[in-house]
Image: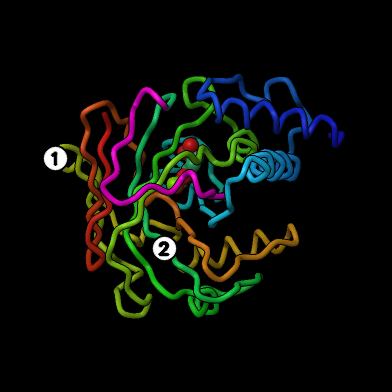
């Protein structure tokens, strides 16, 4: 695909994210939308955000659990980029009308204290981690009806829109990271139950996979960045009035309210 077309498509997905409008899948009209091209579109669209003053604060993994792969009908982990306007304080209130068709999922997040360059093993990846915490990610695909191919969702920065982190931060080896029970409640009712083991069998594998995939593009993770390891359960549609809590064993609660 030509550089001009990549910039053009980046402007379309960025505009849809900015204006919260639905768009048609890119793959439907662009047969040369490979995964490689899709990551170029993602990078170019996030560059537009950075040019508007947002900061890159981390990365996210997506489709790292079977539940998510089955829900979305795609079967390969992908990564996206997190910017400063996506991070809300724990317990924040979000206006539903500012989003398209938001869904929410419980996650585990890594806080990096060292730079991390792939390829690495999961054990090596964990050496870059200063802390782990509970997280909730709101995803809001810009594609009509939340339907997409794998390259489409990559181009759309893996549906990233908002996230919150829990207040409890622990060193990765201080918790049973490979099998933390996770419950997501909406208005006090458990709606999803899972474990951090659902995230590629261990969240450290997700972090290592991220560093390794980024290395293929000549990119690396930096000290101070946040990494969302990927949804541990299927994502759930949210509506005004919902109070959503992710309760993660040993790591407390990440929560937010929709109005
Ligand atoms: C893609 C984003 C997936 C996750 O944690 O699996 C994701 C989507 O489902 O829209 O964030
Ligand atoms: Mg996610």
Q: Is residue 192 left or right of residue 224?
A: left
Residue occupying the point 20% across, 43% down = 185
Q: Is residue 131 magenta?
A: no
Frontmost residue, 250 versus 72 = 250
The answer to whether the residue bearing label 2 lies less than 8 angstroms from the nearest atom of ligand 1 is no
Q: Residue at label 2?
A: 201
Give the residue drawn at x 52%, y 68%: 224
Q: Callout 2 environment at 10 Å: few (<14), some (14 to 19), or many (20+)?
A: some
Residue 112 location in percent, x, y? Answer: 50, 70
Mark closest to the chain's N terminus, 1 or 2: 1
Helix, strand or loop at mark 1: strand
Res. 62 mark: none
**Numbered circles on residues, count:** 2
Q: Position of residue 232 (x, y in %)?
A: 36, 52
Does 90 lie within the magenta span? yes
Residue drawn at x 49%, y 59% as measured from the top left: 227
State the image quarter where residue 104 is shown.
Answer: top left
Q: In the rendered view, tell whether residue 206 sits above or below residue 24.
A: below
From the image, which quarter does the N terminus lie in?
top right
CA–CA distance between discs 1 and 2?
26 Å
The image shows residue 192 at horizontal and vertical percentages of 25, 44
Quadrant for the C terminus in the image: top left
Secondary structure of residue under mark 2: loop
Task: Give percent across and percent down for residue 15.
Answer: 62, 27
Q: Residue at x 53, y 74 (%)?
A: 125
Mark 1 surroundings within 10 Å by alpha-carbon count, few (fewer than 14), some (14 through 19), many (20 or more): few
Name the side, left or right, on which 149 lies relative to 192.
right
The residue beneath circle 1 is 189
Residue bounds of the magenta highlight: 81-98
Q: Tell me if residue 40 comes above or below residue 227 in the rendering.
A: above
């Amino acid at each position: 695909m030509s550089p001009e077309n990549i910039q053009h498509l980046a402007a379309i997905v960025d505009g849809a994210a900015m204006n919260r409008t639905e768009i048609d899948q890119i793959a439907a009209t662009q047969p040369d939308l490979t995964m490689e091209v899709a990551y170029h579109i993602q990078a170019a669209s996030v560059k537009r955000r950075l040019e508007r003053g947002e900061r890159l604060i981390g990365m996210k993994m997506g489709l790292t659990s079977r539940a998510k792969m089955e829900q979305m009908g795609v079967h390969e982990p992908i990564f996206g980029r997190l910017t400063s306007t996506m991070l809300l304080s724990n317990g924040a209130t979000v206006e539903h009308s500012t989003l398209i068709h938001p869904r929410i999922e419980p996650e585990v997040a890594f806080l990096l204290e060292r730079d991390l360059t792939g390829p690495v093993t999961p054990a090596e990846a964990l050496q870059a981690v200063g802390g782990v915490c509970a997280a909730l990610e709101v995803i809001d695909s810009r594609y009509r009806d939340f339907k997409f191919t794998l390259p489409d969702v990559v181009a759309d920065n893996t549906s990233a829109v908002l996230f919150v982190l829990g207040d409890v931060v622990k060193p990765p080896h201080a918790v049973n990271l490979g099998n933390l029970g996770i419950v997501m409640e909406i208005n006090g009712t458990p709606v999803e139950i899972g474990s951090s083991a659902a995230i590629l069998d261990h969240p450290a594998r997700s972090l290592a996979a991220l560093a390794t995939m980024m290395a293929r593009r000549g990119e690396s993770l930096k000290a101070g960045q946040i990494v969302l390891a990927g949804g541990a359960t299927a994502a759930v549609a949210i509506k005004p009035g919902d109070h959503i809590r992710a309760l993660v064993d040993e790591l407390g609660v990440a929560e937010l309210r929709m109005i």
